[in-house]
Each structure stands twice: as C-alpha cells, then as structure tokens.
Image (tube, coloured by chain):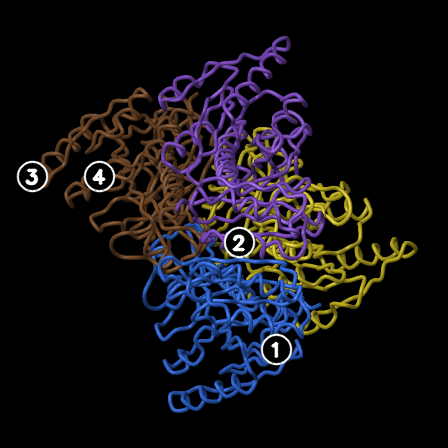
Chain colours: A blue, B purple, C brown, D yellow
Amino acid sequence: MARHIMTLTCDDRPGIVAAVSAALLSVSANIVENQQYSDEATNLFFMRTVFDAESADVPRVLDAVRASPAIAEEQLDVRPEAERCRTVILVSKFDHCLLDLLHRWKSGDLPIDIVAVVSNHEDCRGLVEYYGLPFTVIPVTKETKADAEAQLLRLVEVEDVGLVVLARYMQILSDGLCRALEGRAINIHHSFLPGFKGAKPYHQAHDRGVKLIGASAHYVTADLDEGPIIEQDVVRVTHAESPERLVAIGRDVERRVLSRAVRDHAESRVFLSGHRTIVF
Amino acid sequence: MARHIMTLTCDDRPGIVAAVSAALLSVSANIVENQQYSDEATNLFFMRTVFDAESADVPRVLDAVRASPAIAEEQLDVRPEAERCRTVILVSKFDHCLLDLLHRWKSGDLPIDIVAVVSNHEDCRGLVEYYGLPFTVIPVTKETKADAEAQLLRLVEVEDVGLVVLARYMQILSDGLCRALEGRAINIHHSFLPGFKGAKPYHQAHDRGVKLIGASAHYVTADLDEGPIIEQDVVRVTHAESPERLVAIGRDVERRVLSRAVRDHAESRVFLSGHRTIVF
Amino acid sequence: MARHIMTLTCDDRPGIVAAVSAALLSVSANIVENQQYSDEATNLFFMRTVFDAESADVPRVLDAVRASPAIAEEQLDVRPEAERCRTVILVSKFDHCLLDLLHRWKSGDLPIDIVAVVSNHEDCRGLVEYYGLPFTVIPVTKETKADAEAQLLRLVEVEDVGLVVLARYMQILSDGLCRALEGRAINIHHSFLPGFKGAKPYHQAHDRGVKLIGASAHYVTADLDEGPIIEQDVVRVTHAESPERLVAIGRDVERRVLSRAVRDHAESRVFLSGHRTIVF
Amino acid sequence: MARHIMTLTCDDRPGIVAAVSAALLSVSANIVENQQYSDEATNLFFMRTVFDAESADVPRVLDAVRASPAIAEEQLDVRPEAERCRTVILVSKFDHCLLDLLHRWKSGDLPIDIVAVVSNHEDCRGLVEYYGLPFTVIPVTKETKADAEAQLLRLVEVEDVGLVVLARYMQILSDGLCRALEGRAINIHHSFLPGFKGAKPYHQAHDRGVKLIGASAHYVTADLDEGPIIEQDVVRVTHAESPERLVAIGRDVERRVLSRAVRDHAESRVFLSGHRTIVF
C-alpha cells in the first residue's frame, strides 16, 4: 500500500463524496485525510483526499470517479505522496528567499525536487552549488527577453516542472509566459496597510508611519502582483525602525510567506476558484 | 430543507466516509461542509458533517449510519444547526469574560441560548439584567458547597444544558461535579512560558521577565487546570509593563480565548480524544 | 509629590535632554520614565517624560525648559498623570467599539473621563445609560449637518474635550470640523492587504481570498481614512469564512485596535510628525 | 564624529539623566537615541544612550559620569557602534539556528563578528566553510568534557569574545563554565503552554493537544533552561500536525527567537536585573 493524494474540482451537486468514497472503498483504500469546500459564488466543489491504496488500483479509482454521474466538469488528479513536485526557482541578486527554500528543502521540510535554479545574474551561484544543485544563468536584456523566456519555458516543459518559484526574481514576465505558467508559478510581494504604489515601498511605509509590514505570496498572472493570494503575513514595527531596518524585517516576512506558499502548493493544498484560492 | 450538523466518533476502519455519504445521499441530503481526522494514537476516527436535508429524513440517516458494518463503537449525533447550545455561565466578581460572552451572544456571534447566569456573588447582577437574562445567586461556603453544587447540577439537568462556562468562576468544583459535567464545562486559565505555580501568577511572570503572557481554555476535569485544551493565545509584553498592567492584558487574552472556545463547542467543532481535543 | 507627564516637541539640536533633566533636577523631581525620538526627515525631536514632583514646582520646570537656548519652536505640556483625558465618543448603530471602550473605562483600564456619548441614532441609549453616562442624540440630515457639527464642536469646547473617538460613527465629518479637531479625533477603519475601494469591503476581501483582515486607527483629517496611523492589527482568516463571519471577525479587530489607540492618546504617548505618528 | 553606545546600570536616585546628559553636552555630543527604566523591585536604574561624538572625547564623558554624585554602584560602558560584538557559535548537528545566524550575519543584519563556530561534531563544517568562517571541532566525551570546556573558555578569553551562542548545542555546560560566561552566553529552548518535563517534548505537546508551540532564548545559568529570558515567541498549531511537523515548526520558532536575542545582545539592548532582563 502506498499513500496517495487525490485532488478534485467539479460542479457542486449531491453525491460527489459518496461517489469518491465508494470508488476508494471498492479497492479497499483507506482514507487518511479529507478536506472539501463548496464555493457558493462559483458553484464549484473542491476536495483533497489522502488515502492509502495499492498503486495498481489507482486507475480503477480514477475511472470510477470519472464515470460517476454526480461528478461533472471535473479536474481530477491522483499522485503518490512520495512523488515530489518538480520545481524551478528563479532568482536575481537577493538570496534570502532562495536560501530559505534551499534550507527547508535540505531539511526535508519541503516536498519538492529542485530541478534547477535559474537566474539573470551570477550572484547566487556559490550558494546554489554549495547545496549541490544546478545553477543556470539566463541573462535578460530588452533584446534577449523573448529568447530568455522561451529558454525558461523549454526547461519547464522538458523537465515536467510543476512549480516555478519567483524567489525575488526582479524581471516582469511577459503575458504569454504568465499564461503558460498559470496556476504553477508563485511570486512573493511586499504588502502594506494601506498599500503603496511606485518605487521604494518600505521608504513610503516609513514616511506613512505604518505599524505593520507584510508580504503576500500569489500565483503569477498577467495582472502584475494581483494574482490569487496563497498566503500572507505581517510583522509589527514602530516609528523607531529606519527604512533600512524595515527592508530587513520585510525580508524575513517575505521568505517565511513564500516558503509556506511553496509547501502548500507542493502538497497539493491550493485550488483556484476564479480569482481566489482555496487552501486546505 | 434544513441545515444539520452531524458529529461522529468511532473506531477507525475503511468505509466510514462511504457509509456516511451513502446514507446522506439516500435521502438526497447535500453535504455543505465536512471535516475528518484519524488519530493514529487512539485509532479513533472523528467526523463533522454539515448537510442540508428534510428534518423528517434525519432518523433514516441515523439508522443507516448505525447499521453500517464499517462503523463501530460510535458516538453519533445529528442536530439542526438552528438549535442553539443551551448554556449556563458561572461567574464570581470579575466580569470581563462574562461581558464578552454576553456581547457576542447579543450580536448573534455565538450560537448559544443563555439559560442562566449563576454566581456566588451579587456583583454582576446589573450587567446580566441589562442584557435581559436571569441572574441566579447561589452562595458557596464550606458548609453549603455540596448543596450549591447539587442545585447547579439540577439546573443543568432540568434545563437540558449542553455547556457550562466558568467565566472566571473562582470556586473549585468537586470531583463529582467535574465528572458529571465532563466534556461540557469549559474553564479559562492564564498560561505562561514557563508556567508558574501558586498565587499571584502575573506578579511571578513580571518577576521572571516573561515576554509573552497567555491564556488557555480547557474542558474541566477533576485534574485542576489540566483538562483537555480547546484554545490558547498569547500577547507580547515587555519589562516596562507593571504587574497590574499584565493583569489587565491577561484579562484581554482570557476573554478572547474563552469566547473562541465557547463558539467552537457550541458549533460542535470540538471532539475529545483521550486527553487532547480535535478542533475542526 | 505627584506624578506628572511632560510632552515636548521641538527642533532637534544638542542639549535638549540636558536642559530638561536639569530643569527637573532643580526642583528635585524624580524621572520615572523617559522616551525620546529624533526624526531625521523633519529634524524634529520628541520627548515624553514621566516624573514625580511637587505640583507647585511645575511652573518653574516649564519656565526653565522654555528659557533654554537648546529648545526652540517647542510644543510643551505638563499635566498630572491623574488628570484624565476628557473624551466624547461618537457612535451610530454598531455598538461593538463603544462597548469595548465603556468596559475598559469602567475597569479602570482607560485613563479617560467620558463627558458624553453622542449619536445620530437612539440605538445605543440603553447601553450608555447602563454605564451611567449621558447619551445625547444629535440627528444628522443633509439639511441639519452644519448645525449638528456646530453643536458637537460647542460641546467639545465647553467641556474642554481632549479626545473625540469615532467609534464606528457613520457620518463623514466636514473639512472644517476635521481641522477644528486635528490631532484629537480618532477614527477606526478596516484595512486589508491589498486595500479595497468602494462598498462592502469584507465581501470584496472574501471574493479576493485574502488571508488576513485588519483595522487601522488614525487621527481624523480632511483626507478621508488617510490620516496619520496610530495603531493597526490583523487577524488570520481562511477561504472557509463567509463574508458575514469576516464582518464579525473585523468587529473584533476594530474594537481592539481602537481601544489601544485611545489608551495611547489618553496616556499622551502619540506625537504627530508630519503625516506619521510617533507612539511611545 | 562617530556613533557610540553607552550602557549604564546604577542605583536609582534623582539626577542620573541630568548628569549623563550634561556630560555628553560638555563634549558637544548629540544624543540620537535614549532609553531608560527604573526597576522598583531592585531599585536599579538602566539606561542605553546612542550618541554622536568625537572618539577622543569619550574618556572625558566616562570620567564625568563616574564622578557624578548622582551615580553610584555603576556599571558603565561606552563603545563605538561600529565595533561589532565578537561572537562564538556553538553547534552540534542541527544546523537550522546556525544557518539563520550565518545568513543574517552575511546580510549585514546582525552586528557581530563571528570569531569561530565550535562544534562537538563534524556535521556543520561544509556550511560554515561555505560562509568562509573557521570551524573548530572540540569533541566532548565524559572523560574529555573538562578539557573541552577549558579549551572553549581559553578561546573566549584569547579572542575577547562578548557573546557565546548555543545554537542547538546539545551539551550541558558545567556550572563553572556557566558562571564564567554569565551574561554573555545565550541558549535557545523550546517552550510550551503548559511546559513539559523530560524527553521528546514535541511528542508530549502533540499528545496533550497544545494549540501553541514556542521557544525562549535566555542567558545561560547553572540552573538549566531557567536563565533570564531575552526573547520568546509562539506559533499556532492544530491537532492535525504530526509530532514530526511540530518539530519542524519548532525549528522555525527557535531560529527566529534566537536570532532576535542575538541581535538584541549585540546591539547592547539587554540588561540583567536579578533574574529578569530589561530589553530596550
């Protein structure tokens, strides 16, 4: 018996849970964990089920679920829990988010396989190679941007990548690339109450005397920094913190929030429902 | 159709979810919310399911679940969501927890019916009567304690009370009363890192220079202040806070934690698994 | 000897602390607490000093500080700590912030004297009168708004009010009234990451799937909900919370944040430095 | 002009601030930051002052402060802010706290110079050497413990070390070493509400169903894990977290709390007052 994770999104109607649990029972699978949510706004049903079963029986489960009249317009997936999410990390010069991801990966805290770390700069090579991982530099200029993105996308396709993490990658992705990576690219962004437009946001936050600074991790969409939010957090600050100190505190929140979002995604806990996420 | 809440605890074995969901489907019930947990340590299975169904069909659901060979040693309950938890609040002189409960009840934020507020002192009468609720004084002395507890227990039984809240009730309940109220009496208690034995805990916390003060809400057991924990929270403090200020901050945490625990219980979200709670 | 609080804002230059502490020492005052901050952006110096001294000696301290060549363009104030901040609370129909203020005032947790609670509706009369406080209804319509504001301002002046709290007061103050109350009127406002414009912000927050909801307390300025921030806080939420539940959670954050801001102001801890606050 | 940090502990009596600020003014020093606290329990006064002055003038400031009749039984120190705290890190096999310290040090976020990383195991050599720092293995067995401690103490003395960080160093220091390092050795320890004695504390916390897990950083004393607390924090958990997951979450809290305590110490913000700390 091996542990599997099933994720299901479908139209919300009676009988879904009965159909799924009957399908699992028919192969003597044991349900270990189960979460579900019905979104009234979209009439969509979301379910994440962890179960123990013989791997050879999984196709029968899938067939039974798909054949059920209760389950329509479904997106259905089952994978072994042991199969780790193949991940590419994009980074520029700031290494705080990268280091946090690498350390957690090394500790066994993040169920991902890191296929490559890709950067438009050389700066992080030492760190990445210390962790024994391949480091690829794809420089980006106005002229080479299209080529660079094509190269990245090829890597994603060839390597069957399930997650691209923008770990403070300071390039704006083209709309085309955003669409190609929809639902599998995560970005991290500072967040304030209230928000600030324009450059030097931590300096603006200091000038405005905010008492909390935060960060949001979200899926990348063509709408810059406005993609569906996966995770957020804040830290309390005072007037006495300089803008430079706010930036350092911001780094802490950013890395914490990004790593949590990456784990949620890698554990198949995040579902898209229109412009929002369901996180089990 | 009316909304119902089912709670189920039973031995953990394959087929439970299938049996419950088939039983619900057989009366065309619609599952709105569902949570479950398998406790490996005790081999117990816990489930909370919110569903819409005809009230007349509920007995058939109960019968079908009980008849299922997958479900053994079960504790099973279904109640209409609209049926509010009948609650008695015990209080002495401090009114901060009481007020928070009354205000949330009045705002519709707590699904409880307050049957009575019982106190061993007159102090809170004005507040309780402002909220239009019955206030009963049952004085407690060493001589009258047994009588007082008997009177309280009679009230609980006559009024079919599902929850007794010790909202800073400064009397120690006898072992017998603790047992009689097992799983339906909630107490609130200050908590520190590290903990302190003996009197004036906030003064001890000040002397020890703790940086966090907290509170725990737990079910009452004969083992004083050591019952299964339902909810906890802390607040950050500094050396500059006087012991009196710590007490005031502690009041804030206490009332917040107690109110959350009461709502969790009243919404049938709390399950006992040995000495710990499962809170959905 | 009585405890006093001195607040000082002046141009930042060497010798200020020496001048103040010499002035205090000259009357054998004992400094109990002292906080200061130099704002590089505005070149302003801020100081809050708590000291024990004979009340009769306070004028000499004030004269000495004012006479010091190190202290220029000063705003200087000394008041007995026992002199409580005379406060008017404005409220409409929602009573959660009002109740929290009244309860803390009654518990001795807020050093304010509540001169009056003023509302444009009758709804909160019972609660206010339960606490033995005067409740004044000043209805506001488009036609009577100018009169109503004049009546409020008269009350503030006649009663020597140091703080006006907008405890979910659902009227927009005119620019003139905002200016007249500058630095002594506090409002509470929901806050989100990201922010939302327009109606039903909690519904928007739900649709956007935010993971944190918060509130900001700020001084009232003519620039609606954009005044200098005094205090902020957030609470973690999930996709499973309905918009109605978000509103209830929001009430909790609002009352907590507003009460903290009121205490900070009443304890003379808040200083204005351009568009931001210094909170000691 | 260079920025300096003065720390002063002395008997609490009138005139201290006047004496210090006059001494600073006499050399035209400019006070940038100032914090003070009077501990009523011990009648001690604590002060931390950041000022800009000519380095050549510092001895005159020290002399003037020491000569003041208002200042008795003083512990007085002035150091350039640019002079970083010479630090030794002790580690065993777990590297999460170590990595966090190294990363923050490299980012310029911690004002320490790392003289050496000392371990009783080889495991962390690669990481330490990646950061270009000396890694020294001092194995510890029952027989060699006294020698190992003597070697460590010699390093501390020869290198003029101001801080020893026990970054999950799994050896109990002898009473003698604890005394020799008093006030300059920081340890990190898990903390729970309630606390747990004995082995496998995260498993005990899981069995007990705690809703918060935390960590405390404290100065090392002969009284194991009971030294004066510098910093604490907690994280919210649920019944669904396995003991292994609790351990991983605990690592996060531990590293965060330890790094904050190290920065507080390195910035000369922590004062000892009996068994508690004052942290400015």
**Mark toward the viewer: 4 or 3:** 3
Q: Are marks 1 and 4 on the same chain?
A: no
Residue, disc 1: A128
Kindly indicate whether the residue at mark 1 contacts the one at mark 3 (C-beta within 8 angstroms). Answer: no
Residue, disc 3: C143
**SS for callout 1:** helix
The dot on residue D4 is 2
Determine the CA span between mark 3 and mark 2.
62 Å
Residue A241 in the image: state x and y as whole percent.
45, 54
**Mark toward the viewer: 3 or 2:** 3
Residue B150 versus residue A197 in the image, above or below: above
Residue D106 in the image: state x and y as whole percent.
59, 68
Residue, disc 4: C181
Q: Residue furthest left?
A: C143
Q: Alpha-carbon neighbours of circle 3 within 10 Å: few (<14), some, or many (≥20)?
A: few
**Mark toward the viewer: 1 or 4:** 1
Q: Nearer the viewer, residue B73 or D40?
A: B73
Instruction: Report in which chain the residue with disc 3 lies.
Output: C
